[in-house]
């Protein structure tokens, strides 16, 4: 089979990364597969690249995936990257492909969904309304209010010790500019970002947050982007509190929304307990692979 790999240009870099892309096609120009290499650009992750791609089922086992992978690995090395990440559904052809080509398994993930039509609303309300002495909830849509921006950016450190096993993920450095850019990127896609946060009553600072991104038409499934509590304030049930409030707000404001999606590392026992307590049910499992360059 005649096989050609054509580099493509991604004209819209994201706030924290840029992408390279390749198209695999035959002699007649018929697309066979593609690969996308995300190059992280923010401080703390300049060593990292992430690969996404796929080959049409009818064209597998003919070297298409290997050629695309070679192009991506070569580019990552040229860009001075130390680690290349890729994810595949457990037991899928992609899972077998990555394992056979030198990637090592570094993280197991479980994807889960909460069907909003099936929730025990009375219980969710009870969890959301339960008092937590010394703390109070606040929430907003889109970009964080200016008066909360600094402590919200500081609260993102809650994700620094998120279980990542052997993943060379680096440290995501958050500042006000970055949290604002992230919210603007969601709005630019036509989606809605809703954030629930916990305030420390002693000083008014944000000590935890839970983000949910809702499709622009309010239908289908929304996606949790992250839930975290600063280490000093853990052990008070704040993660469960915030997520319960996020659920009932989504159900009230978006009556046509079908469900809420989340993904959690299997080693992240505290978040798994929260999801289980709220009724999230597993939908699929995935593996995070890493290639040391």
Image (spheres, helix red, strand yellow):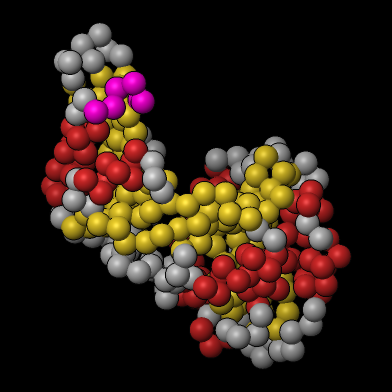
Would you say 176 lies left or right of 70 here? right
Q: Quadrant of residue 256?
A: top right
Q: Is residue 170 visible?
A: no
Depth check: give the residue in front, 194 or 144.
194
Image quarter hosting the C terminus = bottom left
Asked if residue 58 is among those painted magenta in the image, a careful observer would answer yes
- Where residue 152 appears, as percent x and y from the top left, is 56, 71
User: Which residue is painted at 30% across and 35% down in the image?
Assistant: 35
Residue 37, placed above or below residue 234: above
First to last magenta residue range = 56-61
User: Which residue is painted at 45% across and 70% down in the image?
Assistant: 267
- Where residue 135 appears, as percent x and y from the top left, is 70, 84
Q: Is residue 90 visible?
A: yes
- Where residue 218 appears, as percent x and y from the top left, is 71, 42
User: Which residue is painted at 18% across and 32% down in the image?
Assistant: 67
Image quarter hosting the N terminus = top left
Depth check: give the residue in front, 71 or 179.
71
Would you say 50 lies left or right of 3 here? right
Q: Quadrant of residue 160?
A: bottom left
Depth check: give the residue in front, 16 or 273.
273
């Amino acid at each position: 089979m005649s096989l050609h790999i054509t580099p493509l240009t991604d004209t819209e870099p994201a706030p924290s990364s840029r992408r390279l892309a390749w198209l695999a096609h035959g002699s007649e120009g018929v697309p066979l597969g593609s690969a996308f290499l995300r190059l992280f650009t923010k401080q703390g992750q300049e060593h990292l690249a992430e690969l996404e791609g796929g080959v049409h089922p009818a064209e597998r086992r003919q070297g298409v995936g290997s050629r695309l992978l070679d192009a991506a690995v070569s580019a990552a090395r040229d860009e001075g990257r130390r680690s290349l990440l890729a994810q595949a559904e457990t037991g899928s052809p992609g899972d077998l492909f990555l394992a056979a080509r030198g990637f090592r398994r570094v993280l197991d993930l479980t994807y889960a969904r909460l069907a909003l039509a099936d929730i025990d609303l009375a219980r969710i309300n009870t969890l959301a309304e339960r008092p937590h002495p010394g703390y109070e909830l606040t929430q907003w849509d889109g970009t964080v209010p200016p008066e909360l921006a600094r402590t919200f950016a500081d609260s993102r450190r809650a994700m620094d010790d998120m279980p990542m096993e052997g993943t060379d993920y680096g440290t995501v450095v958050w500042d006000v500019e970055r949290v604002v850019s992230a919210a603007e990127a969601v709005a630019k896609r036509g989606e809605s970002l809703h954030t629930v946060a916990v305030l420390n009553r002693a000083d008014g600072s944000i000590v935890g947050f839970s983000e949910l991104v809702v499709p622009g038409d309010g239908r289908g499934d929304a996606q949790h982007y992250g839930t975290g509590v600063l280490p000093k304030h853990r052990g008070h049930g704040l993660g469960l509190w915030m997520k319960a409030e996020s659920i009932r707000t989504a159900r009230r404001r978006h009556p046509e929304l079908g469900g809420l999606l989340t993904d959690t590392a299997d080693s992240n026992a505290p978040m798994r307990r929260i999801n289980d307590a709220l009724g999230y049910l597993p939908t699929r499992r995935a593996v995070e692979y890493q290639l040391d360059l």
